[in-house]
Image (tube, rainbow, N blue to C red):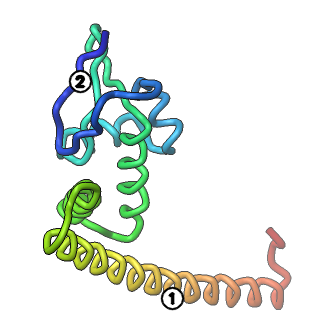
């Protein structure tokens, strides 16, 4: 019988199928090493451990990993990732002024993400323009067509 482990988030009763780290990694598209690192820095805690000590993950654990995976290419720091996960966890039960403050923080994350996406699009457009310029030069000078 798996033992539930306390962590930064409380997924509630362990429901649904438990997955070992390899399956969790495959489903989320992260390496096992990355998931272990995220555990070491406190971003994710497996919901349970098997009697043999293997990490066991639930669907909500995978959801948390997916949030972190989406934040990484936008340049969010580990502290920012941890903060957002805390906001998302707290929103489920918050009310009144606390809920309003959490929604403000969530809005700030949305604004930051949108700004970073725009910057990445600008960088991509510049890179595509450069690649097209090189392709034009190759075409004009009879270079390879790959």
Q: Residues under labels 2 and 1: Cα distance?
A: 45 Å
The residue lying at 40 percent from left, 33 percent from top is 58
User: Which numbered dot is residue 4?
Assistant: 2
Residue reaching furthest to the front: 96
Task: Name the quadrant containing residue 67.
Answer: bottom left
Task: Name the quadrant containing residue 69.
Answer: bottom left
Quick check: marks 2 and 1 in contact, CB under 8 Å?
Answer: no
Observer-nearest residue: 45 or 100? Answer: 100
Observer-nearest residue: 122 or 50? Answer: 50
Q: Quadrant of the C terminus?
A: bottom right
The residue lying at 51 percent from left, 88 percent from top is 122
Q: Is residue 82 above or below residue 51?
A: below
| Left or right position of 17 against 90 | right
Q: Measured from the top left, where is residue 102 in percent x and y? A: 21, 70
Q: Measured from the top left, where is residue 6 in percent x and y? A: 16, 32
In the picture of the structure, the residue carrying the numbered disc 1 is 122
SS at circle 2: strand
Q: Measured from the top left, where is residue 141 in percent x and y? A: 81, 87
Q: Quadrant of the N terminus?
A: top left
The residue lying at 27 percent from left, 8 percent from top is 51
Q: Is residue 49 above or below residue 29?
A: above
Observer-nearest residue: 91 or 19? Answer: 91
How many marks the image carries: the answer is: 2
């Amino acid at each position: 019988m798996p033992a539930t482990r306390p962590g930064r988030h409380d997924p509630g009763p362990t429901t649904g199928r438990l997955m070992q780290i390899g399956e969790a990694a495959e489903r989320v598209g992260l390496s096992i090493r990355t998931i272990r690192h995220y555990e070491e820095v406190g971003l994710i805690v497996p919901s349970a451990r098997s009697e043999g000590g293997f990490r066991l993950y639930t669907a909500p654990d995978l959801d948390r990993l997916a949030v972190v995976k989406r934040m990484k290419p936008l340049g969010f720091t580990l502290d920012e990732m941890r903060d957002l996960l805390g906001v998302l966890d707290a929103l489920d039960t918050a009310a009144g002024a606390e809920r309003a403050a959490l929604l403000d923080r969530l809005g700030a994350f949305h604004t930051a993400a949108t700004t970073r996406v725009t910057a990445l699009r600008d960088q991509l457009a510049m890179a595509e323009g450069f690649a097209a310029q090189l392709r034009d030069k190759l075409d004009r000078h009879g270079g390879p067509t790959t």
